[in-house]
Image (cartoon, coloured by chain):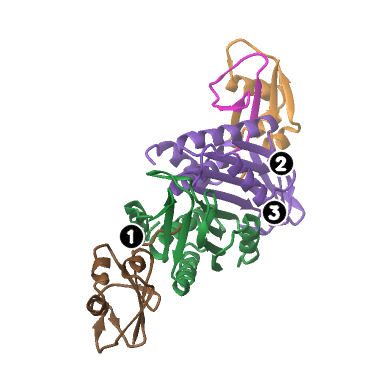
Chain colours: A brown, B orange, C green, D purple
Amino acid sequence: MITVKAFAQVREVVGKETWQVAGAHNQTVADVLDNLCELDSRWRAAMDDELLVAVNHTMRDSSFTVNDGDEVAFFPPVTGG
Amino acid sequence: MITVKAFAQVREVVGKETWQVAGAHNQTVADVLDNLCELDSRWRAAMDDELLVAVNHTMRDSSFTVNDGDEVAFFPPVTGG
Amino acid sequence: MFARVSDTDFNQQRLYDELVAGCAASPGGIVTFTGLVRDFNDNGKIDGLSLEHYPPMTEHAMRSLAEQAISRFALTNAGIVHRVGHLSNFSQIVWVGCAASHRASAFDAACYIMDTLKTAVPLWKKEFQNGTGHWVKAKASDADASLAWMKDNDR
Amino acid sequence: MFARVSDTDFNQQRLYDELVAGCAASPGGIVTFTGLVRDFNDNGKIDGLSLEHYPPMTEHAMRSLAEQAISRFALTNAGIVHRVGHLSNFSQIVWVGCAASHRASAFDAACYIMDTLKTAVPLWKKEFQNGTGHWVKAKASDADASLAWMKDNDR
C-alpha cells in the first residue's frame, strides 16, 4: 500500500488528509495521481491548480518512482514564513 | 577662537583632546591644520596617517571653510560596529 | 543548530541566547529575522490567520535548510523556529537567526533561509477576512528570490 | 526611531519591543544585527577592547543614518544602539533593528546601516593584547561596502 497525504487547498478539495492506494511495480508519482483520480473524481479537480509532490518527506517531481510502503504527499505551493 | 578636537590615535599623538586656535577670515580646514602644526609639531606627526575631519559634527573635506566659533575635529578612519 | 515547529509564541531573547550558546566559535555578528502577521492584505483588513503544515516533513525541511546555510555561508550557528495553528494580527510567525564571523555572511545566510523557506518548507497560510478563510496564494516574487540563490553560487 | 550611545549592556528583547512599539504601521518583517567582541584578531587572542567616540557627533550621525535608512528603504521603524567604553570578549557592541512591510527592505536597510556606520560614525576600537592596547585599523573592505551603497541607488 501507498499512503497518500493531502494538505491545504488540496486537502479541502479532496475532502480528507489521508488516503491509501495499492502499490504497483515501477509506478511513478503521476501513476499514483491517476489511480487517485479513478478512486475519487475530486482528485481531478485538485489537479486544476499547481500541485507539489513530496515522497517520504522530500520534494520530487511527477516522474519519480514510488515504491510500496512510501508516503506520497500532494499540496499547493507553500506560503509559510 | 576655533575649538579643535582630536580623537583616538590622533589624540594620543598630539597629546590632548581639546585645542584652541585663533579664528581668521576665509580660512579652510587645511589652514587650521597648518596653524596647529606651527603651534605644536606633534600635529605634523599626526598628519602621517589618514585624517578625517568634522566641522560642527558633520564630516567635511580639507577645503571646507571654517568660521570663528566652529568646532573642528580631526580623527583617524572610524572602526565602530 | 536548531529547527523547530511550535504551537506557542517565542521569546526573542531566549532564541538569541540559544543561538549564541550553540556557536561553534566566537561569532562576530548575529542577524535575526522575525516575520509578523500584518493586519491587512491586498483586499483590506484581515483578522488573523491559521498555519497548516506537514508535521514530519516541516522540521526535516527546516533542519536541512539550516544545515545547508551553515555550510554554504560558513556560519558558526543557525536556528529556525516557525509557528503553526491560529495566529492573531501582529503575532510573531517565524524567527531565523544566523551567527557568523563576518556580518556579510550572517546577512546573506538569513536572507537565503527566508527566501528558501518560502518555497521549500511545507507550510500554508489561510487568512481570515469577514469571517471567511482564504488560502494565501504563493507569490511569484518568492519563487524568483528562491531560484536566484540556486543560480547564484558565486555570491 | 531611536539612536543611542550606551555605556551599559543592552537586552535583545527590550530593544526588539521598543522597535515594534515605535512602528508607524504594522510591520511584516524585522531584521536585527548584533555585533559582538570576538576573542581573537589576525595576530591571535585578544583580551577585550575599548571604544572611544566623539560624544555629540556620534548620536547625531547615528540618528541621521537611521532617518536616511527609514526614508531610503520605506521602513516602518529603525533603531541603533552602540556601546562605548571597555568591553570584554564576547560582549555585545552594537545593535541595529529595521522593521518594514517586506523582508527585502528590512534586510537591505540593516545591511546599509551597518556598512555606513562602519565608515561614517565617529567610533574607534582599541584591542588589548598581552596587556597592550592597539588601535584597530579601518578595513578597506568596509570602505568598499559603504561606497557601494552610495553608487547603488537602484538597489
For marks 3 and 2, give the CA distance: 13 Å
Q: Is residue C21 magenta?
A: no
For the magenta stretch, what is the residue range?
A: B54-78
- State left or right for residue D107 relative to residue A1: right
Q: Quadrant of residue A35?
A: bottom left
Q: Which residue is found at the position 46% from the left and 49% from the top? A: D103
Mark 2 secondary-structure assignment: strand
- Identify the residue at horizontal 63%, vertical 37% (top origin): D3
Identify the residue under disc 3: D91
Quick check: can you spot residue C29? Answer: yes
Amino acid type, callout 3: Ser
Q: Residue furthest front?
A: C131
Residue shown at 57% from the left, 42% from the top: D118
Quadrant location, the N terminus of chain A: bottom left
Packing grade of label 1 (10 A; few <14, some 14-19, many >=20) is few
x and y percentages locating residue A71 in the rendered image: 37, 80
Say whether residue C134 is left or right of residue C16. left
Mark 2 or mark 3, which is nearer the start of the sequence? 2
Residue D14 location, x and y as percent? 67, 48
Q: Secondary structure at mark 3?
A: loop
Query: Mark 1 = which residue?
Result: C151
In magenta stretch: residue B59: yes
Q: Quadrant of residue B64?
A: top right
- Label number found at residue D6: 2
Q: Chain of mark 2?
A: D
